[in-house]
Image (tube, rainbow, N blue to C red):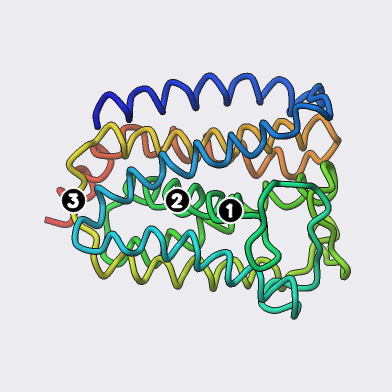
């Protein structure tokens, strides 16, 4: 398993930097669009390995996130609730209930990365309080690029933030909160710290990819939001050390 984790992370990292150049600078040719699905599945699988370590007695949560997010997205596509009215334009491969199955992998990436990033803080209920906020933080970078730059999906209604409905972010928060409550119920201290640290990097890598792409398209506000993730990472430098210092202050 350790070798598989290392090889998967190596593969994902290489794939990420290739994608950072091709997607960030709009160099991805149409015949290579399938690479997006590979990126999502690789990141989702690595996040799932992390969550597997986080909830050893609640591993059913992993398929709940994967299939639950697809079900919620399907409701959204067909009813406009809870995210607003939208439609997928790009072909992300096989669909389930009218939703590309890559969306399930994407949600695993978001929840896993957000949970790992929340571990840089040490206070009670951090999972329930921080993971939904970090998930929305990621969507503040993802949605403007996916909808306005890449046209992966299109919104019927507009909003104040890059013409994206505010309802979308409320829906993201509610969905992430549901998954976070489940994680908080079963989570345990992580045994494999490398998984935790790499998923924190995943949080930053997702921001880097969408932040760069947004900046190249002139969406500088999105780039600033993504840069703020790096600033917070630097401020909490080391995570464990930051957490320990907070614990000392409390004691």
N-terminal of the pair, mark 3 or mark 1, is: 1
Check residue 189 in the rendering and tell me which mark sits there, or answer none: 3
Q: Which residue is mark 1?
A: 137
- Mark 2 vs 3: CB contact within 8 A: no
Label 2 SS: helix
- Quick check: 74 left or right of 4? right
* One can see residue 231 in this view: no
Q: Residue at x 39, y 52 (%)?
A: 115
Residue 237, given in percent of the width and then of the height, sits at 36, 33
> Eyeballing the image, is 77 above or below 32?
below
Residue 124, given in percent of the width and then of the height, sits at 26, 65
Cα–Cα span, label 3 and label 1:
24 Å
Quadrant holding the N terminus: top left
Label 3 SS: loop
- Quick check: 87 left or right of 6? right
Q: Nearer the viewer, residue 77 or 224?
A: 77
Q: Count the numbered circles shown.
A: 3
């Amino acid at each position: 398993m350790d070798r598989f984790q290392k090889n998967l992370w190596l593969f994902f990292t290489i794939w990420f930097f290739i994608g950072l150049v091709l997607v960030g600078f709009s160099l991805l040719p149409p015949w290579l669009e399938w690479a997006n699905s590979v990126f999502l599945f690789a990141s989702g699988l690595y996040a799932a390995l992390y969550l597997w370590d986080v909830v050893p007695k609640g591993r059913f949560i992993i398929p709940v996130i994967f299939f639950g997010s697809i079900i919620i997205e399907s409701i959204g596509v067909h009813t406009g609730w809870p995210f607003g009215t939208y439609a997928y334009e790009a072909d992300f491969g096989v669909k389930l209930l009218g939703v590309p199955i890559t969306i399930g992998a994407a949600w695993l990436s978001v929840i896993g990365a957000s949970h790992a990033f929340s571990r840089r803080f040490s206070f009670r209920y951090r999972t329930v309080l921080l993971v939904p906020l970090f998930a929305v933080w990621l969507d503040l970078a993802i949605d403007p690029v996916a909808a306005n730059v890449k046209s992966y999906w299109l919104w019927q209604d507009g909003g104040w933030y890059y013409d994206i409905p505010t309802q979308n972010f409320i829906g993201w928060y509610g969905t992430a909160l549901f998954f976070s409550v489940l994680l908080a119920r079963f989570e345990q201290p992580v045994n494999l710290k490398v998984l935790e640290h790499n998923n924190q990097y995943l949080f930053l890598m997702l921001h880097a990819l969408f932040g760069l792409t947004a900046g190249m398209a002139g969406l500088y506000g999105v780039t600033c939001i993504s840069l703020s993730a790096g600033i917070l990472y630097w401020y909490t430098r080391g995570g464990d050390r930051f957490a320990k210092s907070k614990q000392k202050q409390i004691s």
